[in-house]
Amino acid sequence: MELALPWQFEVGSMIVLTLILIADLLLIIKRPHIPSMREATLWVVFYVSLALIFAGLMWYFAGKEYAGQFVAGWLTEYSLSIDNLFVFVLLLSQFRVPRQYQQEVLMIGIILALVLRGIFILLGAALIQHFSWIFYLFGAFLVYTAYKQAFPGGDEFEGVQEPAIVRLARKHMEISPDYDGAKIRTVFNGRKMWTPMLMVFIAIGFTDLLFAIDSIPAIFGITQSPFIVFTANIFALMGLRQLYFLLGGLLDRLKYLHYGIAFILAFIGVKLVFHAMYQNELPFINGGEPITWAPHISTWASLVVIVTSMVIATVASLLSKDKSGH
Protein backbone atom coordinates (compact mmCIF):
# COMPACT_ATOMS: atom_id res chain seq x y z
CA MET A 1 0.00 0.00 0.00
CA GLU A 2 1.33 3.44 -0.95
CA LEU A 3 1.84 5.47 2.19
CA ALA A 4 0.79 9.09 2.20
CA LEU A 5 0.50 11.83 4.76
CA PRO A 6 -1.52 15.04 4.37
CA TRP A 7 0.75 17.66 2.77
CA GLN A 8 -0.32 20.08 5.52
CA PHE A 9 1.18 17.71 8.09
CA GLU A 10 4.45 17.39 6.16
CA VAL A 11 4.84 21.13 5.60
CA GLY A 12 3.76 21.97 9.17
CA SER A 13 6.20 19.41 10.59
CA MET A 14 9.15 20.87 8.64
CA ILE A 15 8.26 24.42 9.77
CA VAL A 16 8.00 23.41 13.44
CA LEU A 17 11.24 21.38 13.35
CA THR A 18 13.09 24.23 11.63
CA LEU A 19 11.89 26.69 14.28
CA ILE A 20 13.03 24.35 17.07
CA LEU A 21 16.49 24.06 15.49
CA ILE A 22 16.76 27.87 15.09
CA ALA A 23 15.65 28.45 18.69
CA ASP A 24 18.17 25.87 19.92
CA LEU A 25 20.98 27.53 17.93
CA LEU A 26 20.08 31.03 19.15
CA LEU A 27 20.02 29.79 22.74
CA ILE A 28 23.56 28.44 22.39
CA ILE A 29 24.88 31.59 20.70
CA LYS A 30 23.30 33.82 23.34
CA ARG A 31 24.56 31.79 26.31
CA PRO A 32 27.56 29.53 25.53
CA HIS A 33 28.11 27.26 28.53
CA ILE A 34 28.87 23.74 29.66
CA PRO A 35 25.50 22.04 30.24
CA SER A 36 24.99 20.19 33.50
CA MET A 37 24.03 16.52 33.59
CA ARG A 38 20.50 17.54 34.56
CA GLU A 39 20.19 20.00 31.66
CA ALA A 40 21.59 17.51 29.14
CA THR A 41 19.25 14.79 30.44
CA LEU A 42 16.18 17.03 30.19
CA TRP A 43 17.04 18.00 26.59
CA VAL A 44 17.58 14.37 25.55
CA VAL A 45 14.26 13.38 27.17
CA PHE A 46 12.59 16.33 25.41
CA TYR A 47 13.84 15.33 21.95
CA VAL A 48 13.10 11.63 22.47
CA SER A 49 9.58 12.51 23.65
CA LEU A 50 9.15 14.80 20.65
CA ALA A 51 10.13 11.96 18.30
CA LEU A 52 7.66 9.57 19.95
CA ILE A 53 4.86 12.19 19.75
CA PHE A 54 5.72 12.65 16.07
CA ALA A 55 5.48 8.86 15.56
CA GLY A 56 2.10 8.91 17.30
CA LEU A 57 0.86 11.61 14.93
CA MET A 58 2.02 9.53 11.98
CA TRP A 59 0.12 6.52 13.35
CA TYR A 60 -2.99 8.69 13.66
CA PHE A 61 -2.76 10.15 10.15
CA ALA A 62 -1.38 7.20 8.14
CA GLY A 63 -1.45 4.03 10.25
CA LYS A 64 0.99 1.87 12.18
CA GLU A 65 3.15 0.88 9.19
CA TYR A 66 4.14 4.48 8.54
CA ALA A 67 4.76 5.08 12.26
CA GLY A 68 6.80 1.89 12.50
CA GLN A 69 8.98 2.93 9.58
CA PHE A 70 9.67 6.28 11.24
CA VAL A 71 10.55 4.74 14.63
CA ALA A 72 12.79 2.08 13.04
CA GLY A 73 14.48 4.71 10.87
CA TRP A 74 14.90 7.13 13.78
CA LEU A 75 16.43 4.45 16.04
CA THR A 76 18.77 3.33 13.25
CA GLU A 77 19.97 6.89 12.65
CA TYR A 78 20.22 7.50 16.41
CA SER A 79 22.38 4.42 16.92
CA LEU A 80 24.62 5.38 13.99
CA SER A 81 24.79 8.93 15.37
CA ILE A 82 26.21 7.57 18.61
CA ASP A 83 29.06 6.30 16.49
CA ASN A 84 29.48 9.91 15.31
CA LEU A 85 29.98 10.93 18.93
CA PHE A 86 33.13 8.83 19.27
CA VAL A 87 34.70 10.79 16.42
CA PHE A 88 33.34 14.15 17.63
CA VAL A 89 34.87 13.54 21.07
CA LEU A 90 38.27 12.90 19.48
CA LEU A 91 38.03 15.84 17.08
CA LEU A 92 37.09 18.34 19.80
CA SER A 93 39.91 16.97 21.96
CA GLN A 94 42.44 17.01 19.12
CA PHE A 95 41.62 20.62 18.21
CA ARG A 96 41.49 21.58 21.92
CA VAL A 97 38.14 23.33 21.56
CA PRO A 98 37.29 25.21 24.80
CA ARG A 99 34.52 23.24 26.51
CA GLN A 100 32.15 26.23 26.80
CA TYR A 101 32.11 26.54 22.99
CA GLN A 102 31.69 22.84 22.23
CA GLN A 103 27.89 23.15 22.17
CA GLU A 104 28.09 25.72 19.37
CA VAL A 105 30.58 23.61 17.42
CA LEU A 106 28.33 20.56 17.71
CA MET A 107 25.26 22.56 16.67
CA ILE A 108 27.00 23.90 13.56
CA GLY A 109 28.13 20.33 12.84
CA ILE A 110 24.55 19.11 13.15
CA ILE A 111 23.27 21.78 10.73
CA LEU A 112 26.00 20.83 8.25
CA ALA A 113 25.01 17.18 8.66
CA LEU A 114 21.36 17.97 7.96
CA VAL A 115 22.24 19.89 4.78
CA LEU A 116 24.55 17.11 3.53
CA ARG A 117 22.06 14.37 4.38
CA GLY A 118 19.28 16.32 2.71
CA ILE A 119 21.33 16.30 -0.52
CA PHE A 120 22.06 12.57 -0.16
CA ILE A 121 18.38 11.81 0.53
CA LEU A 122 17.30 13.59 -2.66
CA LEU A 123 19.97 11.76 -4.67
CA GLY A 124 19.08 8.42 -3.06
CA ALA A 125 15.35 8.89 -3.69
CA ALA A 126 16.02 9.74 -7.36
CA LEU A 127 18.26 6.68 -7.81
CA ILE A 128 15.74 4.35 -6.18
CA GLN A 129 12.91 5.69 -8.33
CA HIS A 130 14.77 5.09 -11.60
CA PHE A 131 17.12 2.19 -10.80
CA SER A 132 15.70 -0.54 -8.54
CA TRP A 133 18.98 -2.47 -8.84
CA ILE A 134 20.65 0.24 -6.74
CA PHE A 135 19.42 -1.75 -3.71
CA TYR A 136 21.98 -4.45 -4.58
CA LEU A 137 24.75 -1.85 -4.31
CA PHE A 138 23.34 -0.29 -1.14
CA GLY A 139 23.03 -3.74 0.46
CA ALA A 140 26.56 -4.84 -0.49
CA PHE A 141 27.97 -1.51 0.72
CA LEU A 142 26.25 -1.83 4.12
CA VAL A 143 27.46 -5.43 4.60
CA TYR A 144 31.01 -4.28 3.78
CA THR A 145 30.65 -1.31 6.15
CA ALA A 146 29.38 -3.66 8.88
CA TYR A 147 32.46 -5.86 8.46
CA LYS A 148 34.77 -2.81 8.73
CA GLN A 149 32.83 -1.64 11.77
CA ALA A 150 33.13 -4.99 13.56
CA PHE A 151 36.73 -5.70 12.52
CA PRO A 152 38.47 -2.34 12.04
CA GLY A 153 41.96 -3.86 12.03
CA GLY A 154 43.13 -1.93 15.06
CA ASP A 155 41.71 0.61 17.47
CA GLU A 156 39.88 2.92 15.10
CA PHE A 157 39.20 5.36 17.91
CA GLU A 158 42.77 5.54 19.14
CA GLY A 159 43.34 8.72 17.17
CA VAL A 160 41.83 10.70 14.36
CA GLN A 161 44.11 11.97 11.63
CA GLU A 162 43.32 15.43 10.32
CA PRO A 163 41.27 15.13 7.13
CA ALA A 164 43.21 15.98 3.97
CA ILE A 165 40.89 18.93 3.36
CA VAL A 166 41.95 20.44 6.72
CA ARG A 167 45.66 19.98 5.94
CA LEU A 168 45.07 21.63 2.56
CA ALA A 169 43.28 24.56 4.23
CA ARG A 170 46.17 25.02 6.68
CA LYS A 171 48.62 25.28 3.78
CA HIS A 172 46.68 27.99 1.95
CA MET A 173 45.16 29.98 4.83
CA GLU A 174 46.65 32.00 7.65
CA ILE A 175 45.51 30.43 10.92
CA SER A 176 45.90 32.18 14.28
CA PRO A 177 47.59 30.15 17.03
CA ASP A 178 44.71 30.58 19.50
CA TYR A 179 40.90 30.61 19.56
CA ASP A 180 38.99 33.88 19.83
CA GLY A 181 35.80 32.64 21.43
CA ALA A 182 33.64 31.01 18.79
CA LYS A 183 34.77 33.40 16.04
CA ILE A 184 36.22 32.12 12.77
CA ARG A 185 38.04 35.40 12.01
CA THR A 186 40.28 37.36 14.35
CA VAL A 187 43.13 39.90 14.44
CA PHE A 188 46.54 38.56 15.44
CA ASN A 189 49.63 40.79 15.50
CA GLY A 190 47.67 43.40 13.56
CA ARG A 191 46.71 40.99 10.78
CA LYS A 192 43.35 39.45 9.91
CA MET A 193 43.51 35.68 10.26
CA TRP A 194 41.25 32.65 10.40
CA THR A 195 40.95 30.99 13.80
CA PRO A 196 41.35 27.26 14.53
CA MET A 197 37.54 27.20 14.90
CA LEU A 198 37.22 27.24 11.11
CA MET A 199 39.41 24.13 10.90
CA VAL A 200 37.14 22.45 13.45
CA PHE A 201 34.04 23.24 11.35
CA ILE A 202 35.74 21.91 8.20
CA ALA A 203 36.81 18.69 9.97
CA ILE A 204 33.33 18.10 11.42
CA GLY A 205 31.67 18.86 8.07
CA PHE A 206 33.94 16.34 6.34
CA THR A 207 33.19 13.77 9.07
CA ASP A 208 29.45 14.40 8.63
CA LEU A 209 29.83 13.72 4.91
CA LEU A 210 31.47 10.35 5.56
CA PHE A 211 28.79 9.31 8.05
CA ALA A 212 26.01 10.39 5.67
CA ILE A 213 27.40 7.96 3.09
CA ASP A 214 26.80 5.13 5.60
CA SER A 215 23.56 6.23 7.20
CA ILE A 216 21.44 7.18 4.18
CA PRO A 217 21.60 3.74 2.49
CA ALA A 218 20.84 2.20 5.91
CA ILE A 219 17.59 4.09 6.41
CA PHE A 220 16.52 3.56 2.79
CA GLY A 221 16.62 -0.11 3.73
CA ILE A 222 13.76 0.60 6.14
CA THR A 223 11.66 3.07 4.18
CA GLN A 224 11.68 4.62 0.73
CA SER A 225 9.72 7.69 1.85
CA PRO A 226 12.01 10.78 1.59
CA PHE A 227 9.87 12.55 4.22
CA ILE A 228 10.36 9.74 6.76
CA VAL A 229 14.07 9.50 5.91
CA PHE A 230 14.64 13.23 6.44
CA THR A 231 12.52 13.61 9.59
CA ALA A 232 14.16 10.52 11.14
CA ASN A 233 17.55 12.13 10.49
CA ILE A 234 16.41 15.45 11.97
CA PHE A 235 15.19 13.83 15.19
CA ALA A 236 18.32 11.67 15.52
CA LEU A 237 20.65 14.64 15.04
CA MET A 238 18.65 17.06 17.21
CA GLY A 239 19.33 14.97 20.29
CA LEU A 240 22.97 14.33 19.40
CA ARG A 241 24.47 17.48 20.95
CA GLN A 242 22.88 16.90 24.35
CA LEU A 243 23.73 13.20 24.20
CA TYR A 244 27.39 14.18 23.77
CA PHE A 245 27.41 15.96 27.15
CA LEU A 246 25.15 13.38 28.81
CA LEU A 247 27.25 10.35 27.93
CA GLY A 248 30.57 12.14 28.44
CA GLY A 249 33.14 9.64 29.61
CA LEU A 250 30.70 6.75 29.19
CA LEU A 251 31.43 6.54 25.46
CA ASP A 252 34.83 4.92 25.91
CA ARG A 253 33.26 2.27 28.18
CA LEU A 254 30.78 1.07 25.55
CA LYS A 255 33.39 -1.20 24.01
CA TYR A 256 30.88 -3.59 22.40
CA LEU A 257 28.70 -0.86 20.90
CA HIS A 258 30.39 -1.08 17.50
CA TYR A 259 29.39 -4.76 17.30
CA GLY A 260 25.74 -3.80 17.81
CA ILE A 261 25.98 -1.12 15.14
CA ALA A 262 27.77 -3.54 12.79
CA PHE A 263 25.00 -6.13 13.25
CA ILE A 264 22.32 -3.52 12.46
CA LEU A 265 24.16 -2.45 9.29
CA ALA A 266 24.65 -6.07 8.19
CA PHE A 267 20.98 -6.89 8.89
CA ILE A 268 19.73 -3.90 6.87
CA GLY A 269 22.25 -4.70 4.12
CA VAL A 270 20.86 -8.24 3.79
CA LYS A 271 17.31 -6.85 3.90
CA LEU A 272 18.18 -4.51 1.02
CA VAL A 273 19.56 -7.39 -1.06
CA PHE A 274 16.35 -9.38 -0.44
CA HIS A 275 14.34 -6.33 -1.50
CA ALA A 276 16.44 -5.98 -4.67
CA MET A 277 15.90 -9.68 -5.45
CA TYR A 278 12.14 -9.30 -5.06
CA GLN A 279 12.14 -6.34 -7.47
CA ASN A 280 14.92 -7.72 -9.68
CA GLU A 281 15.22 -6.29 -13.20
CA LEU A 282 18.85 -7.20 -13.96
CA PRO A 283 18.93 -9.48 -17.03
CA PHE A 284 21.86 -11.60 -15.75
CA ILE A 285 20.01 -12.48 -12.50
CA ASN A 286 17.08 -14.91 -12.84
CA GLY A 287 16.62 -13.86 -16.45
CA GLY A 288 15.61 -10.34 -15.43
CA GLU A 289 12.55 -11.65 -13.55
CA PRO A 290 11.74 -10.84 -9.89
CA ILE A 291 12.85 -13.53 -7.40
CA THR A 292 9.51 -13.98 -5.65
CA TRP A 293 10.80 -16.46 -3.06
CA ALA A 294 13.12 -13.80 -1.56
CA PRO A 295 12.20 -13.35 2.15
CA HIS A 296 10.32 -10.21 3.14
CA ILE A 297 11.42 -8.66 6.45
CA SER A 298 8.68 -6.47 7.90
CA THR A 299 9.20 -3.02 9.42
CA TRP A 300 8.30 -4.28 12.89
CA ALA A 301 10.75 -7.20 12.65
CA SER A 302 13.42 -4.66 11.71
CA LEU A 303 12.48 -2.52 14.70
CA VAL A 304 12.84 -5.50 17.07
CA VAL A 305 16.27 -6.37 15.63
CA ILE A 306 17.52 -2.77 15.91
CA VAL A 307 16.39 -2.32 19.53
CA THR A 308 17.60 -5.77 20.61
CA SER A 309 21.04 -5.26 19.03
CA MET A 310 21.63 -1.93 20.79
CA VAL A 311 20.34 -3.18 24.14
CA ILE A 312 22.53 -6.31 24.05
CA ALA A 313 25.63 -4.33 22.99
CA THR A 314 25.08 -1.69 25.69
CA VAL A 315 24.29 -4.14 28.50
CA ALA A 316 27.25 -6.39 27.56
CA SER A 317 29.57 -3.35 27.63
CA LEU A 318 28.34 -2.21 31.04
CA LEU A 319 28.47 -5.72 32.52
CA SER A 320 32.00 -6.17 31.18
CA LYS A 321 32.98 -2.88 32.81
CA ASP A 322 31.52 -3.94 36.16
CA LYS A 323 33.33 -7.29 36.11
CA SER A 324 36.66 -5.77 35.13
CA GLY A 325 36.32 -3.05 37.74
CA HIS A 326 37.24 -0.32 35.24
Image: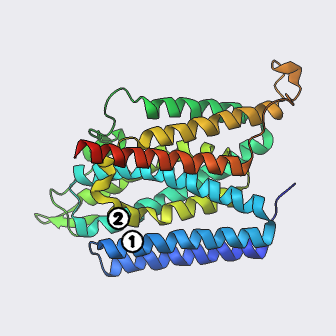
Q: Is residue 287 left or right of residue 29?
A: right
Q: Residues within 10 Å of mark 2 (few under 14, many from 20)?
A: many
Residue 182 visible (yes or no): no
CA distance for labels 1 and 2: 6 Å
Q: Residues within 10 Å of mark 1 (few under 14, many from 20)?
A: some
Q: Which residue is mark 2?
A: 246
Q: Which image quarter: residue 273?
A: top right
User: Residue at (66%, 31%) from the top-left corner?
Assistant: 137
Q: Which residue is mark 1?
A: 41
Residue kind at label 1, given as amino acid type = Thr
| Amino acid type, callout 2 | Leu
The x and y percentages for residue 303 are 64, 51
Residue 139 visible within the image? yes
- For the residues bearing labels 1 and 2, Cβ distance under 8 angstroms: yes
Q: Position of residue 230 (x, y in %)?
A: 63, 59
Q: Secondary structure at mark 2?
A: helix
User: In the displayed structure, does residue 191 sit left or right of residue 111?
Assistant: left
Which residue is at 88% across, 19% downward? Answer: 287
49 with respect to 227 (left or right):
left
> At which x and y percent is residue 314?
42, 49
Above or below 3: residue 151: above
Q: Which mark is residue 264?
A: none
Residues 103 and 3: in front is: 3
Q: What is the quadrant of residue 225 in the picture? A: bottom right
Give 94 or 257, whichever is nearer the viewer. Answer: 257
Residue 298, above or below 133: below
Counting from the top left corner in percent of width and height, residue 172 is at: 28, 46
Residue drawn at x 34%, y 68% is: 104
Most foreground residue, 114 or 60: 60
Residue at 46% across, 30% down: 148
User: From the image, which quarter does the N terminus lie in?
Assistant: bottom right
